[in-house]
Image: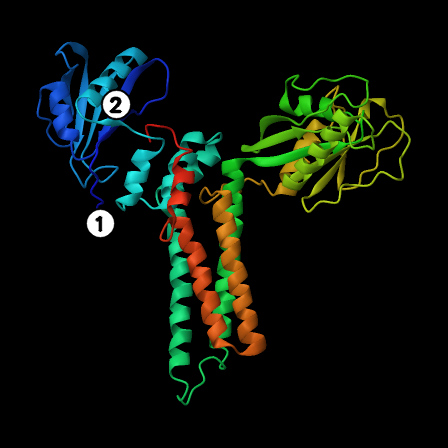
Amino acid sequence: MTIQTNDTICAIATPPGRGGIGVIRISGPEAHAIALQLTHQSLPARTARFITVFDGQDQSIDHGLALSFPSPHSFTGEDVVELQLHGSPILLEQALLAAVQAGARRAGPGEFSQRAFLNDKIDLAQAEAIADLIAATSEQAARAAQRSLQGAFSERVHSLADAITRLRVWVEAALDFPDEDIDFLADGKVLQSVEDLIEQTEHLLEQAEAGRLLNDGIRIAIIGKPNAGKSSLFNALAQRDSAIVTDVPGTTRDVLRETVHFAGIPAVLADTAGLRNTDDVVELEGVRRAQAELKLADLVLWVVDASAAPDEQEQPPAVSAPVIRVNNKLDQLNHPLDTAPDQVYVSAITGQGLDQLDAAIVRVLGLTAEFQGEFSARARHVEQIKTSLDHLTQGRTQLADFSSGELLAEELSLAATALGEITGQLHSDELLGMIFSSFCIGK
């Protein structure tokens, strides 16, 4: 159902700066009346019309095209007018000011998309996909965001939530008729249905995790002892001299980051301070930040100076993320290499072995040619799916171990609720504010 709003909003919908074309978007109940004041023309629906835009003193601002989209057949579900003018920032600001003087107000970040959501033109996951599509840094990420915008992710979530709800209704019906000859909760079908839902949710979680990696980028932490060559490797992978490289231990004090791509997937490389005990307050803070980066990493590159004498006390970091041992300074070795599958040899200075490191990263993260990502996803989506999976797992325990249909029904309800927060079937004003505030003004 369309939400009626009392105000009309306007914004420049094209990126800041000069361009061939700039677009002014106007949405709300007074959109057509404001457009009439600006153009001195009544605009036909969904037809491009050549117009002149005038200011409040009837002075010509610019010539261009106007498009009118009457409610509810528009992006926001409201009356919408778009003015396509020359992409001069000064001209566009003049036209925007004229729209404000005619009765519109400047839109807030993401307000057009928020109105589209409130008017049931898109759901919350689709709204977020708009921002993801704009921010995509790879072809795969753009395609995944486009599929989410078209509803691929939402359909999967809705389908799973509906299946969970149907089972909850079945369980509650069985509880309402305890005197029936058949004990629906004991015949094994309900337990099998829960198992099937868990399997479906795990599969959705895998796909959402892949979509999150496409959207947010893979976090790769480069760690190791001082002077192992971490910064040199960081520069080699980033293909630029971002990090300062010296022979002085402890040169890197803060976390440096660069975005690169592996198999077309964006990755955020993090160069960290050398891990060692130190009394230097600044270096100690760098070590603390390095350890914090480890906790966030999707992959860890553990850099070891292969030219130095083996340090039996040096152990790989204790993290949940996969670890690749990178034996650096290959150009200084004069002994046979250890060809263990969990490590590679490189020279960050000469570039030797970097191809093998790239291949190892792709292999460990599963970034195969088939890794395309069926849809884009965000960290909050992943967390909600995990929450739903936790409730389903707990529900299985309540039924299998305690034969408690009441607790199973409650866990099923909570599982469906968690999924509903992904698409916005259940939401809070605080959540909407947090999501749409990250959008650009004209969206």
In the rendered image, the vertical position of residue 158 relative to residue 365, given as above or below: below
Graded by Cα atoms within 10 Å as few (under 14), some (14 to 19) or many (20 or more), the crowding at tag 2 reads many
Residue 307 x/y as whole percent: 86, 27
Q: Going by the picture, which residue comes out furthest to the right?
A: 309
Tell me which corner region of the image, top left, top right, bottom left or bottom right, holds residue 435: top left
Residue 441 x/y as whole percent: 35, 28
> For the residue labelled by badge 2, is the local secondary structure a helix, a strand or a loop?
strand
Residue at x-position 66% and y-position 16%: 241
Which quadrant holds the C terminus? Answer: top left
Residue 171 x/y as whole percent: 42, 75
Q: Check residue 20 in the rendering and tell me which mark sits there, or answer none.
A: none
The residue identified by callout 2 is 24
> For the residue labelled by badge 1, is the local secondary structure a helix, a strand or a loop?
loop
Is any atom of residue 135 visible in this view?
A: yes
Q: Amino acid at mark 1?
A: Met
Residue at x-position 52% and y-position 68%: 395
Q: Is residue 166 left or right of residue 308?
A: left
Q: Is residue 117 left or right of residue 280?
A: left
The residue identified by callout 1 is 1
Residue 221 x/y as whole percent: 67, 34
